[in-house]
Image (cartoon, grey):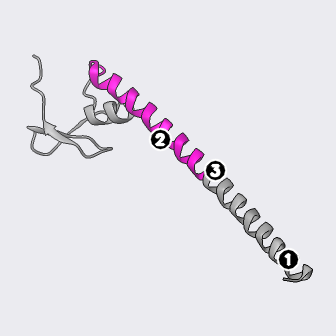
């Protein structure tokens, strides 16, 4: 090989190495973003576990909305008075007997 060919080959190797550095930096950023997303998701699950292990808030609160998202959404009676539903998540369940 001539000096010119050696120089061209070296420049091509340098270019490929630089491309690999850029690719690995992008991959690192993507993995860090995913790690952070999983960390937040895990924290949400721990909070939901805490809500699930404790009592529901007072009132006719949707248990699914409370446990999953910490939202106190009031259940509504359906046409047939024996059922109630959550207006936010759509959960349906038998109506509780009223204390008289």
For mark 1, does the 10 Å Cα neighbourhood hold few (<14), some (14 to 19), or many (20 or more) residues? few
Image: 8 above or below 63: below
Q: Image height check: is 67 above or below 34?
A: above
Per the image, the residue denoted by label 2 is: 38
Left or right: residue 90 versus residue 100 is right
Q: Earlier in the sequence, mark 1 or mark 2?
A: 1
Q: CA distance from mark 3 to mark 1?
A: 35 Å
Query: 70 or 9, which lies in front?
Result: 9
Reading the image, the residue beneath label 1 is: 6
Q: Is residue 7 above or below residue 99?
A: below
Q: Secondary structure at mark 1?
A: helix
Q: Residue at x 79, y 74 (%)?
A: 12
| Mark nearer the viewer, 2 or 3 | 3
Dominant secondary structure (helix, strand or loop) of the stretch shown in magenta: helix
Circle 3 residues within 10 Å: few <14, some 14–19, many ≥20: few
Q: Which residues are magenta?
A: 28-57
Give neighbour class at mark 2: few <14, some 14-19, many 20+ (Cα, 10 Å).
Answer: few
The residue depicted at 73 percent of the width and 69 percent of the height is 16
Residue 1, image x, y percentages: 84, 83
The circle drawn on residue 29 is 3
Q: Nearer the viewer, mark 3 or mark 1?
A: 1
Q: Residue at x 69, y 62 (%)?
A: 20
Q: Nearer the viewer, residue 57 or 12?
A: 12
Secondary structure at badge 2 equals helix
36 relative to 88 in the view: left or right: right
**Mark 2 vs mark 3: which is more N-terminal?**
3
For marks 3 and 1 on the same chain, the one whose residue lies earlier in the sequence: 1
Residue 26: x percent and y percent?
Answer: 65, 56
Using the image, determine if residue 54 lies above or below residue 25: above
């Amino acid at each position: 090989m001539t000096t010119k060919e050696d120089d061209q080959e070296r420049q091509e190797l340098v270019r490929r190495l630089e491309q690999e550095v850029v690719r690995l930096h992008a991959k690192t950023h993507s993995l860090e973003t995913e790690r952070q997303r999983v960390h937040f998701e895990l924290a949400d699950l721990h909070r939901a576990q805490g809500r699930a292990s404790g009592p529901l808030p007072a009132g006719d609160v949707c248990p699914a909305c409370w446990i999953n998202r910490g939202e106190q959404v009031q259940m509504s009676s359906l046409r047939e008075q024996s059922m109630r539903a959550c207006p936010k998540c759509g959960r349906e369940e038998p109506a509780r007997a009223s204390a008289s």
